[in-house]
Image (cartoon, rainbow, N blue to C red):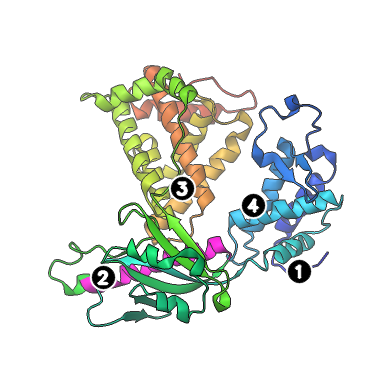
Amino acid sequence: MIEAPFSLSRKQARTIERALFRLVGDKSFIDVRSIEDLKGVSITHELHLPDGRIKTLNDSGLEQFEILVSTVYDADSFHGLADYADLWDASKKTFAELSAANVMAGTAQEWLGLLSARLASEIRSRTFVVPFVGLELKGIDELALGPYKIIRPSINFLDQAGVDHSWTDVPSKLQSYRCWELWLTGSALGTHRVAESRIRTQSALVAGLIAVVAAAMLPNGATELFISPNMTGHDTDGRTTWFSWGEAGSDFARHSSGLRGLPLPIDANLRDQLVDASYITTAMRIFQSERRTPLEEAVARGFHWFADAHRDPTQVMQLVKYWSCIETLFSSDQEGITRSLSVGVASVLVCGGYGFAKVDDYQDLKKRVAKLYALRSQAVHRASRNHVKVRDVAELSRFAGQLLLNALSFIEDGYQTPAQIKERCQRIDESFDARGCEATPS
């Protein structure tokens, strides 16, 4: 095993080594003797060994594995060139290999060295060609903006780049392009996920730059413009295709996208659950009501912001909008907003009508909510854009959804104003101890 010089604080190194130590042996795994032993265990617990065997982590083992990945990610050991999902995949494969050999990395540096060796082939420069709408090249064939170029879609461009695109039938893809679509081309360094994310960000900035210049010159500003990269399909007819390749034209790949997101499957079982759920009935009554209590109005606005947030294509704006959803219930004044929100969210998730969080997690949940709100403040007050990660948005969206469902249960219990919930949450926070709390605020 190799030692690699990575920058870790002493605390981070100790956290990694403690997690590695706790993952050694059988205490982190389920002793599977029958199918009943796997009841309720998700696929995330599975560890696929190189020899084809499958070992299953128990809850404690999965928790230590998550700590391992999160600590490496938070330490930015790979300088942003690998994201959380990359580290999760690499860590799981590395852990599987070590488990199969009945060995374990002894130090944090050794563990990072193993991850580095696995990710070395994944971190490289990639060139992307993405559709770009809202411009017309008149009498010119390209617009060079620093290292990026906007060009007419052209098979010759791919040929000159030395890529083998014969297998993907590019001409037929070009035929599906609309007359206003151009190509934006540029390169980015990182794993494929990171490189694609950086291209998305950079191409949006290029679009913004052109729109700003045009708005400064046109009498109607930017009101008549729509300049945008199109990697989602939202800006055309729901379908889009783009291309990428590695150094020297290697690994040419075609990427296709329709509307963002995956369809939610609803079978007969889920249909019946939704039809019978009281919160569905309550929510629909509120949506259709012209006269609402203050709490019902806040909840209706919360659902509006949630619907808008989950459709937004930008992570940082998703986070900001999810906070707008949550703030409809807890930010009735401007004093102590962070504390009000952290206490409110933690109290409702732990002690609400639907127990989404454990009593023992109350204090940690408050701290996490405060950190997520700090990300929102950084975006709104300091115009930061790339500080929000996928897992931040995922976690906040889950909190917001759970909060709204609990708010519906409060309405069913007779609550009429957000202030009533806020007051109850403050009392819960003041009296919170190891004995827990009531099933619902009262």
Q: Is 282 placed left or right of 247 in the picture?
A: left
| Label placed on residue 70 | 4
Furthest-left residue in this view:
219
**Residue annotated with mark 3:** 373
| Badge 3: residue crowd in 10 Å (few <14, some 14–19, many ≥20) | many
Q: Verify CB contact (< 8 Å) between mark 3 and mark 4.
A: no
Please name the amino acid that badge 2 sits on.
Leu
Closest to the observer, 413 or 398: 398
**Helix, strand or loop at mark 4:** helix
Q: Is residue 161 magenta?
A: no
Query: Looking at the image, which residue is at 36% across and 29% down?
Result: 419
Mark closer to the chain start, 4 or 1: 1
Q: Which residues are magenta?
A: 191-214
Q: Position of residue 432 (x, y in %)?
A: 57, 28
Mark closer to the chain start, 2 or 3: 2
Q: Based on the displayed image, in which of its 4 quarters is residue 280 positioned? A: top left
Please name the amino acid that badge 4 sits on.
Ser
**As drawn, 313 above or below 192:** above
Label 2, label 3: how far apart the Cα atoms are: 38 Å
Q: Position of residue 258 (x, y in %)?
A: 40, 51
